[in-house]
Amino acid sequence: DTGVSQDPRHKITKRGQNVTFRCDPISEHNRLYWYRQTLGQGPEFLTYFQNEAQLEKSRLLSDRFSAERPKGSFSTLEIQRTEQGDSAMYLCASSPQQGNTIYFGEGSWLTVV
Amino acid sequence: GQQVMQIPQYQHVQEGEDFTTYCNSSTTLSNIQWYKQRPGGHPVFLIQLVKSGEVKKQKRLTFQFGEAKKNSSLHITATQTTDVGTYFCAGPHGSSNTGKLIFGQGTTLQVKP
């Protein structure tokens, strides 16, 4: 399968714990995005990488959130000191250099209890 | 700020009936994209419209981009149970030519067999 893959698919954590999600984009795509989706809403943009450079971050991305893409391939999204409001599906997407059509992974569901 | 709105939020139809969802942007868009998300799944890219007044068809699905490039519609003819899911429209944020998109809140389609 050459689509976007995310791991883990589901994560239940206690409030205050740290969690990390991993995303492997489509191999020939150099742009990678993180979105967040809550029930009944459309995806909301969090951050975007072109190769290893993080070019944009949303105001939604508080200082408890950090994303990296160290070698321009896979990416990680870490949430520190999780809060119940962080419960959502975290979607990774990738796209080629040109155009703005993005291809989502299956998402990582986070439940903070 | 820039907003993308969709109506209706929910639609229940009998199998074989037609379905239409409408998308309106607060700003002129360079292009608009449509995604489908099955229950429990992730958004999957359907189509992109670029030109003013553009109409594209995919089998029973007809997509239209308004003349002013601020609205769009998706029409499904003779719905089937496989059409069940949430349909999102999305447009580029500002003048971005990246995958930083603003999504509508989606229209959830239920089809009764």
Image (cartoon, rainbow, N blue to C red):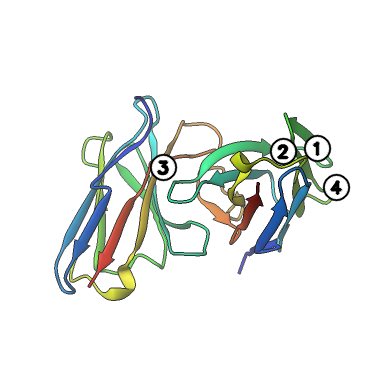
Q: Which amino acid does label 1 sit on?
A: Glu
- The residue at the point 58 percent across, 44 percent down is B35
Label 3 and label 1: CA atoms lie apart by 26 Å
Cβ atoms at labels 1 and 4 below 8 Å apart = no
Report x, y in % for residue A97.
47, 31
Using the image as rendered, state which of residue B94 and residue A3 is in the foreground: A3
Dots 1 and 2 on the same chain = yes
Q: Which of marks 1 and 4 is nearer the N terminus?
A: 1
Residue B16 located left or right of residue B42: right
What amino acid type is highlighted by mark number 2? Answer: Val
Q: Spatial distance from mark 1 to mark 4, Cα to Cα?
A: 8 Å
Q: Residue at label 4?
A: B67
Q: How far apart are marks 3 and 4 (CA)?
A: 30 Å
Quarter of the view holding residue A29: top left
Q: Please name the residue shown 84% across and 41% down the image.
A: B53
Quarter that holds the N terminus of chain A: top left
Mark 4 falls within which chain? B
The chain that hosts pointer 1 is: B
Residue B47: x %, y % from top left: 64, 36
Q: In which quarter of the image is residue A38?
A: bottom left
SS at circle 1? loop
Q: Please report contact status of discs 3 and 2: CB closer than 8 Å, yes or no.
A: no
Tag 1 and tag 2, C-beta contact below 8 Å? yes
* Residue farthest toward the front in the current orientation of the protein: B113
Q: Name the residue under label 1.
A: B54
Residue at the disc numbered 3: A93
Residue occupied by mark 2: B50
* Residue A79 can be seen, yes or no: no
The reply to whether label 3 and label 1 mark residues of one chain is: no
Q: In this view, does A47 lie above or below B9?
A: above
Q: What residue type is labelled 3?
A: Ala
Position of B48 with respect to A113 (left or right) is: right
